[in-house]
Image: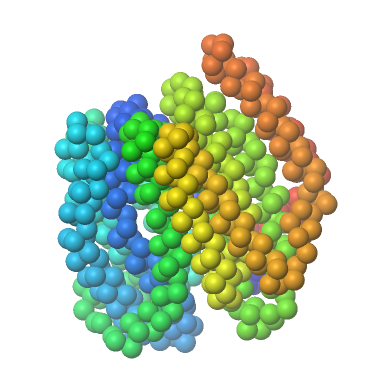
Amino acid sequence: MKIRKVITNAFTTTAQEFGSAAVLFLLYRYLYRAIGAEGLGIWSLVLASTSVITLANQGFSSSVVKFVAKYAAREQADEVSVLIQTAFLSISGGLAIACLALYPAAVWILKLVVPQEHLGTAIAIAPWALLSLWINVGSDVLLAGLAGHELILQRNYVIFGGCLLNLVLALQFVPRFGLLGLAYAQTIEAAGSFLVTWLLLRRQIPQFPFVPRRWNRARFREMIGYGAEFQLITICQAAREPLTKALLTRFAGLAATGFYDMASRWVVTFRELIVQANQVLVPTVAALQERDPDSILRVYRDSYRLILYLSVPSFAFLLAVSPVVSVVWLGSYQPMFVCFVALLTVGWLANILGNPAYVVDLGTGALRRITAGCLTTCILNSALGLTGGKFFGGTGVVAASAFSLMLGYALILIQFHRENRLPFSVLLPRESLKIILSSILAGLLLFPYLRRVTVIIPFSRGTAGLLLGVLLIAILIPMWAHPLRRRVWRWALSRSSA
């Protein structure tokens, strides 16, 4: 029954990620045509400069999931209510003060990197960006409450519904108000998702009040003691994107930042589709550490084999089709977008392959390796980004970001194997060699032809479709022959009969 629950959570989360990615694709396709690459660059930069307020929430959210599950299992609904209220009041009150302090700093940053002709627009949307982020932080605490009750399906409905609402509102407001319309849409969507999540929690917990008013010192200290360990890791992870975007704007301009934002979202969407299903193993590993610690490394091996089986073909496909995606998404072939996709593909693939070790470390509480890897990524991203931007412009900044990401997570993976005395041959299982070789060869060989279809000759849907078909066949045949294919199929069948 526990295995079925894990599988159900993994599949519903993957479905939510896929649906949200489709909506995001449509939204950015529309925004690129409505406000252009520079408009997207302004929006991306403002969000990056204000998103620092979300850092403090990460530890609280992980704590809420853990302790809500603990008290819910004991059937102590009143304690659950007090716990969520304490978390909500603490994080919302603290970040309200932080937002007031951060606004002048955000304006100062924008004045440094945004060209004068766009500065007024950037400053105008900054308060709305802070407001929507503040609401989303409160929503994250409530969503963590749902997750703690194992209401993953309801949580996924809220997230996907919010994506749809944001798309509909953007289509209505952007033609009338431009970038401010996008800020209005995001703020209204955040408020709507917050209200729905609040009502779902009240339905699950009758003791949960409509207006939070109970703050408990003991529950606060309990959550802080658990969540503080995650904060340094979270800060290092969250600092990478704002820094990369600021350096891009400084050395290559707003349009480059806009193309980077779209390329990053495209690549990270593939990453999330693969990784989010693996994240549900964190509580499973935590439980195994108490009951059967010897089986954790077996879970790691199985998890890594599955991640390798899915990620290498997916990222080879992502790289090869990037010229066609540029035409479909942006309306024409944009070499900067395609270049950024290629660089980010390498960096995020290394990140994905390190995820099974990352998940096991989270589950067991062995955070030292993760901290070292994330600190390495953060420091290298800063130092190499400045150097790369100075000598190679925007391409140098993105290459530095991808390289630092790749190296940081490679260190996590290497240290995990060394400390657990696992042979490095596990990283390249014999059964996966055909998939790896066929994926790399198919991606590299077909990329120039797909680029030719979009650049040198007029875009032909028929020719592009034929080449995509050849690419899929070259990747899918070895995947079909792989022994893991039967296991994935059984998991899918068990989900459909759940």
Q: What's the residue at 66%, 23% (across, down)?
A: 467
Q: Quadrant of the N terminus?
A: bottom right
Q: Nearer the viewer, residue 216 or 159?
A: 216
Image mark count: 0
Q: Is residue 107 left or right of residue 228?
A: left
Q: What's the residue at 39%, 84% (across, down)?
A: 222
Q: Is residue 43 left or right of residue 412?
A: left
Q: What's the residue at 35%, 84% (across, down)?
A: 221
Q: Position of residue 229 (x, y in %)?
A: 45, 74
Q: Is residue 95 left or right of residue 44?
A: left
User: Can residue 230 be seen by looking at this rendering?
Assistant: yes
User: Can residue 197 be seen by looking at this rendering?
Assistant: no
Q: Is residue 266 left or right of residue 60?
A: right
- Judging from the image, the colouring scheme is rainbow
Q: Position of residue 395 (x, y in %)?
A: 48, 35
Image quadrant in which you'd find residue 93? bottom left
Q: Position of residue 218 (x, y in %)?
A: 33, 88
Q: Position of residue 482 (x, y in %)?
A: 79, 48
Q: What's the residue at 45%, 70% (across, down)?
A: 230
Q: Quadrant of the C terminus?
A: bottom right
* Residue farthest along the top direction in this orientation: 457
